Image (spheres, rainbow, N blue to C red):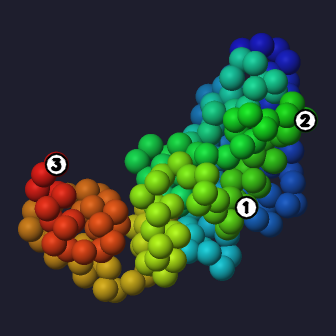
């Protein structure tokens, strides 16, 4: 990796570790390898959102051309959010694409992602199914996002009604992750979710 990128990311890594803002917002970053090309981030679900109480892991890959190109970031922890793929964890955020500026830092990226969790942009979605639910049925979206946060990110338990539907389909022999995805994308209708599972 280019020297400029290594020096810069080392400095930014320390900045995140020392920053009061990141520690107050419960944002962490760890090294995955010693040459600073891959980092692991962790963001706490923001308060007063369906993600509250959850811990969300991020994969952060630093390109050779950093800081002139943005880091490649994706959610490792599964999340139900219009701007984050529920399948791959890919993120739709302008500063990770065409709005990146070399003056931005790792801290900016992590704080922006936490802000995105609190303020979704359903008109610029990464996951159309989630965005549709967010717009058409906000309460169902909130309950679904809470359930995903509980199951995948360790947030407090959510809707007993949804949990009951998951248990019902798991008892039929379907795998839990597949059941959660099917129910979430089929508006928690057990019948259509079952059809989807049988056809996959």
Element type where label 1 sits in the image: helix
Q: Position of residue 167 (x, y in %)?
A: 21, 75
Residue at left 25%, top 56%? 178
Camera-side residue of 131 and 74: 131
Residue denoted by label 3? 200
Residue at left 69%, top 53%? 113
Label ID, residue 103? 2
Q: Is residue 176 visible?
A: no
Q: Quadrant of residue 11?
A: top right
- Looking at the image, tell me whether mark 1 or mark 2 is earlier in sequence order: 2
Name the residue at the bottom extreme: 160
Q: Disc 1 to disc 3, how far (Cα)?
A: 35 Å
Name the residue at the right extreme: 103
Q: Position of residue 89 (x, y in %)?
A: 50, 46
Camera-side residue of 32 and 145: 145
Q: Residues within 10 Å of mark 2 (few under 14, many from 20)?
A: few
When the figure is inspected, residue 105 is found, relative to residue 79, above or below; the finding is above
For the residues labelled 1 and 3, say whether their Cβ atoms are less than 8 Å apart.
no
Q: Quadrant where the N terminus lies?
A: top right
- Looking at the image, tell me whether mark 1 or mark 3 is earlier in sequence order: 1
Q: Is residue 174 left or right of residue 135?
A: left
Residue denoted by label 1? 115
Label ID, residue 50? none
Q: Is residue 110 visible?
A: yes
Q: Disc 1 to disc 2, how far (Cα)?
A: 19 Å
When the figure is inspected, residue 36 is found, relative to residue 125, above or below; the finding is above
């Amino acid at each position: 990796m280019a020297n400029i990128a290594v020096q810069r990311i080392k400095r930014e890594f320390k900045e995140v570790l020392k920053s009061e803002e990141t520690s107050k917002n419960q944002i962490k970053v760890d090294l995955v390898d010693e040459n600073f090309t891959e980092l692991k981030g962790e963001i706490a679900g923001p308060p007063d959102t369906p993600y509250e109480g959850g811990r969300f892991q991020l994969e952060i890959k630093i390109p050779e051309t950093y800081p002139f190109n943005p880091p490649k970031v994706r959610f490792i922890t599964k999340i139900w959010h219009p701007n984050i793929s529920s399948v791959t964890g890919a993120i739709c955020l302008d500063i990770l694409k065409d709005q990146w500026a070399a003056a931005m830092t790792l801290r900016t990226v992590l704080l922006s992602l936490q802000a995105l969790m609190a303020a979704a942009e359903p008109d610029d979605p990464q996951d159309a199914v989630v965005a549709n639910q967010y717009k058409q049925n906000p309460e169902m979206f909130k309950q679904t996002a809470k359930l995903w946060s509980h199951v995948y990110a360790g947030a407090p338990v959510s809707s007993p009604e949804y949990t009951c539907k998951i248990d019902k389909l798991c008892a039929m022999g379907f795998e839990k992750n597949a059941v959660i995805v099917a129910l979430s994308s089929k508006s928690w209708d057990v019948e259509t979710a079952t059809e989807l599972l049988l056809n996959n």
